[in-house]
Amino acid sequence: MVSQIRRKTSLTLDAEALDCAKELGVNVSAVAEAALVKAVAAARREKWLAENADAFAAQSDWHARNGHPLADIIAAPGGASWKS
């Protein structure tokens, strides 16, 4: 997700944390970028889950009524719970 194109931005950060980071040689830009990438991924995941919640509920309801169509071959733990 991270592109090679860089864009300058301005951040307002806690002064003590910034001073400690500088003192310890922490690359604040790299840390901020990694945190931003992680936050964007989490936000996209949450958005996708919310957008698809109705489909998940419908699938769950269908499975509750009919069992899982592959229940006989599911080898994972809990596979037997899919059987009607």
Image (cartoon, helix red, strand yellow):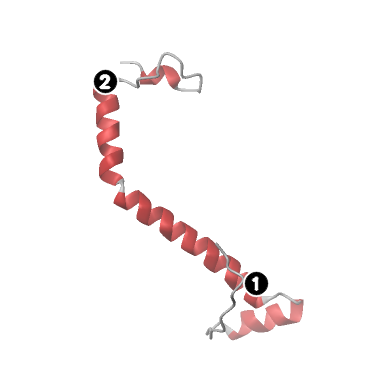
Above/below status of 26 relative to 44: below
CA gap between label 1 and label 2 equals 50 Å
Q: Dot 2 lies on which element?
A: helix
Above/below status of 71 relative to 57: above
Q: Could you tell me the amino acid type at mark 2?
A: Asn
Q: Position of residue 31 (x, y in %)?
A: 63, 70
Snapshot quadrant of residue 43: bottom left
Q: Which mark is residue 66?
A: 2
Q: Which mark is residue 55?
A: none
Q: Position of residue 5 (x, y in %)?
A: 59, 75
Label 1: few (<14), some (14–19) or many (≥20) C-alpha neighbours in 10 Å: few
Q: Nearer the viewer, residue 51 or 28?
A: 51
Q: Residue at x 47, y 63 (%)?
A: 40
Q: Could you tell me the amino acid type at mark 1?
A: Ala
Q: Image check: 50 left or right of 71?
A: left
Q: Which residue is mark 1?
A: 30
Q: Dot 1 lies on which element?
A: helix
Q: Residue at x 75, y 76 (%)?
A: 24
Q: Residue at x 46, y 19 (%)?
A: 74
Q: Position of residue 7 (x, y in %)?
A: 56, 80
Q: Nearer the viewer, residue 17 or 49?
A: 49
